[in-house]
Amino acid sequence: MALPANGYPYTRRMKRKQYDGHLRALQIELVKLQVWCRENGKRIAIVFEGRDAAGKGGTINRLTQHLNPRHAKVIALSKPTETERGEWYFQRYIDHLPTAGDIAIFDRSWYNRAGVERVMGFATPEQVQHFLKDVSRFEQMLIDDGIILFKFWLTIGRETQLVRFHQRRHDPLKFWKLSPIDIASLDKWDEYSAAKEDMFRHTHKKATPWTIVRANDKRRSRLGVMQHFLHAIEYDGRDMEKIGPRDRKIVGSSKAFMFDRD
């Protein structure tokens, strides 16, 4: 299947057979990593952010598919309650941080304030700036306390987003994924781009960097996320041959990736 261009480095989608074989190998490695995490009391937090329809949910599903769900938890919070709106902004996320031996995966996170809340007017400019000033200190506290933190940003082109929105709207199994906020965001592409770039300028730090994943091809992006994750942690029994080299065309953290306007 041909892919929309938008500067994407591949013209065709990865073949199913190639994808399925590599996916299984990586999922076996993920199980080994989770066993190591449990045995050594490690705490891992993974943040997934990105454009609407970038494939965050599907990537998380493949990442956790064969993990023990008691110790690999996905957190996808709804809009804050009245009580939560009166609390310290980070407070409701703290309850979901991992305990020893667990992996916490955030399907959107505290970065809502720098993205949708900012663009859609759910947060004031003062609240946004306060967040951008505080978030790196908050994340440094997590690192200092021993949490291994990953931050993934899945980026797609505008044409790809429109195609996926159309598919969701007409798929009886996926139409619920298309929210009123998604529809409203269609006219705010440039605003989201500006918010994203401002967020990266403030929060891409040496200790807590962003990893950018070009996600026009869901198969390549899913494998890319898993490979990056597995490369980053030296767990017992890691098989680097099975993991394979990272695709630098798909996954990176350079300025060229970060400030790509999708």
Image (tube, rainbow, N blue to C red):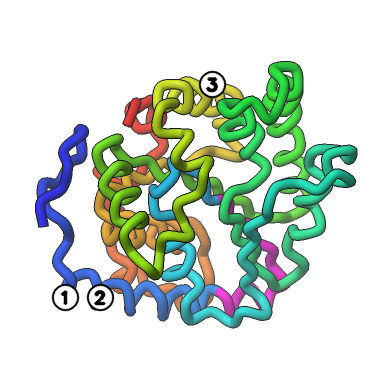
Please provide percent x and percent y for residue 225. Answer: 40, 56
> Disc 1 residue type?
Lys
Which quarter of the image is occupied by the N terminus? bottom left
Neighbor class of circle 1 (other Cα within 10 Å; few <14, some 14-19, many 20+) is: few
| CA–CA distance in space, label 2 to label 1 | 5 Å
Report the amino acid beneath label 3.
Asp
Residue nearest the observer in this picture, 188 or 18: 188
Provide the secondary structure element on which disc 1 rests: helix
Q: To which residue does mark 2 refer?
A: 20
Q: Check if mark 2's residue and mark 1's residue have beta carbons within 8 Å.
A: yes
Real-space Cα separation, disc 3 to disc 2, in angstroms: 37 Å
From the viewer's side, name the closer residue of 140 and 10: 10
Q: Residue at left 69%, top 17%?
A: 125
Number of numbered callouts drawn = 3
Magenta residues (range): 34-47
Determine whether, in the image, residue 13 is placed left or right of residue 134: left
Instruction: Look at 73% across and 63% down and name the residue there.
Output: 98
Name the residue that disc number 3 marks: 198
Indicate which disc, 3 or 2, sits on the residue closer to the N terminus. Answer: 2
Residue 187 sits in quarter = top left
User: Circle 3: is it few (<14), some (14-19), or many (20+) Cα within 10 Å?
Assistant: some
Does the stretch in magenta take in 246? no
Q: Is residue 138 left or right of residue 70?
A: right
Q: Is residue 167 visible?
A: yes
- In-front residue for pair 14/92: 92
- Image disc number at residue 17: 1
Label ID, residue 81? none
Residue 69 is situated, as x and y percent measured from the top left of the image, at 61, 79
